[in-house]
Image (spheres, helix red, strand yellow):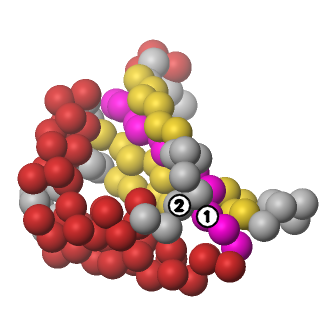
Amino acid sequence: MLIEIGTWQVRSDNREKHLEAAQTLIAVQRAKREEMLYKEVRFYTKVDDETSTEHWMYIDIFENLEDCQEHWDMLEKDDELKAALGNVMSQIVPDSLKTSLWIEEDELRLE
């Protein structure tokens, strides 16, 4: 199993617009669910009381690295997905997006 984690910031006064853009992106992905290669997607937020920003995070779960790469290829090639993702990206604080890939240690899984 592989997870991709992305974190970024959104200005607090831009929260609703960003949330709407993220909801649109998820709706487009939901409509193309059979083509999307992730097993699961989750979004989380954390409010920073000391600044005027919110911290956002997504976690995408994939079966393997190939599925993750194919997923990102699809986001760049499909015009509807590309537009929805571009709208989300336009709402974030510049240079705040950070992503990382994590590979599960299967022998340490506890269910």
**Residue at 35% across, 70% down:** 87
Q: Quadrant of residue 24?
A: bottom left
Asked whether residue 7 appears in the rendered view, the answer is no
Residue at (47%, 31%) from the top-left corner? 100
Residue 35: where, in percent of width, then height?
10, 57
Which amino acid type is marked by label 1? Val
Q: Which mark is residue 90?
A: none
Report helix, strand or loop for mark 2.
loop
Asked if disc 2 and disc 1 are in contact, CB closer than 8 Å, the reply is yes
Marks 2 and 1, how far apart in space?
Answer: 5 Å
Q: Is residue 8 above or below residue 86?
A: above
Q: Horizontally, is 55 left or right of 90 in the view?
A: right
Tell which circle, 2 or 1, labels the residue nearer the N-terminal end.
1
Residue drawn at point x = 51 percent, y = 81 percent: 17
Q: If the image is split into quadrants, where does the N terminus sit?
A: top left
Q: Which mark is residue 92?
A: 2
Q: Is residue 46 above or below residue 98?
A: below
> In the depicted view, which residue is nearer to us: 44 or 20?
20
First to last magenta residue range: 1-12
Rendering quarter of residue 70: top left
Q: Is residue 47 located in the magenta-colored stretch of the structure?
A: no
Q: How many marks?
A: 2
Q: Magenta: predominant secondary structure element?
A: strand
Q: Is residue 65 above or below residue 6?
A: above
Q: Nearer the viewer, residue 109 or 96?
A: 96
Instruction: Evaluate whether residue 69 shows in this view.
Output: yes
Task: Name the kind of residue labelled 2 in the image.
Answer: Ile
Q: Write down the residue under mark 1.
A: 10
The kind of secondary structure element at disc 1 is strand
- The image shows residue 93 at horizontal and vertical percentages of 58, 57
x%, y% of residue 43?
51, 60
